[in-house]
Amino acid sequence: MTFNEYQRGVMRTASDVTKATKENMLMNGILGTAGEAGELVDLLKKQIFQGHPFDREHLIKECGDVLYYLALTAEALDTSLEDIAIKNNKKLWERYPNGFKAENSLHRKEGDI
């Protein structure tokens, strides 16, 4: 499955209310991403501080939920997950042409976000 196929599947399952306006879709996508990322954080917290066992499958499912909301956000921004992935990869190659170096992270070029 490609990112584009996945994104089409997300839109097939997005609620009519979510798809009503780009603004609704954007808000739902961003808030949903934050919420699901919070669930990942909570799983890690419980493992580290509350003695819960490492649950790989649960973590994978939560990552899928994050991906769902990122796809919704991409759609609201009239772009695709594939385009986002390409742009991010290009940015990282430019920032770290020889692999990660703390110096490159600490001293970025102007406008590098």
Image (spheres, rainbow, N blue to C red):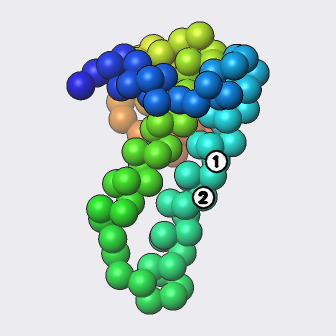
Please name the residue shown 73% across and 32% down the image: 27
Q: Which mark is residue 34?
A: 1
Is residue 93 visible in the rendered structure shown here?
A: no
* Position of the N terminus by quadrant: top left
Q: Which residue is mark 2?
A: 38
The residue sitting at the top extreme is 78
Q: Is residue 5 left or right of residue 63?
A: left
* Position of the C terminus by quadrant: top right
Please name the residue shown 54% across and 36% down the image: 69
Q: Amino acid at mark 2?
A: Gly
Q: Please provide percent x and percent y for residue 91.
A: 50, 21
The residue sitting at the left extreme is 1
Q: Nearer the viewer, residue 95 or 78?
A: 78
Would you say the residues marked 1 and 2 are in contact, meaning their CB atoms lie under 8 Å apart?
yes
Q: Please provide percent x and percent y for residue 36.
A: 56, 52
Q: Secondary structure at mark 2?
A: helix
Residue 94 lies, with reference to residue 106, above or below; the image says above
Q: Please provide percent x and percent y for residue 49.
A: 53, 85
Q: Can you tell which quarter of the image residue 104 is in?
A: top right
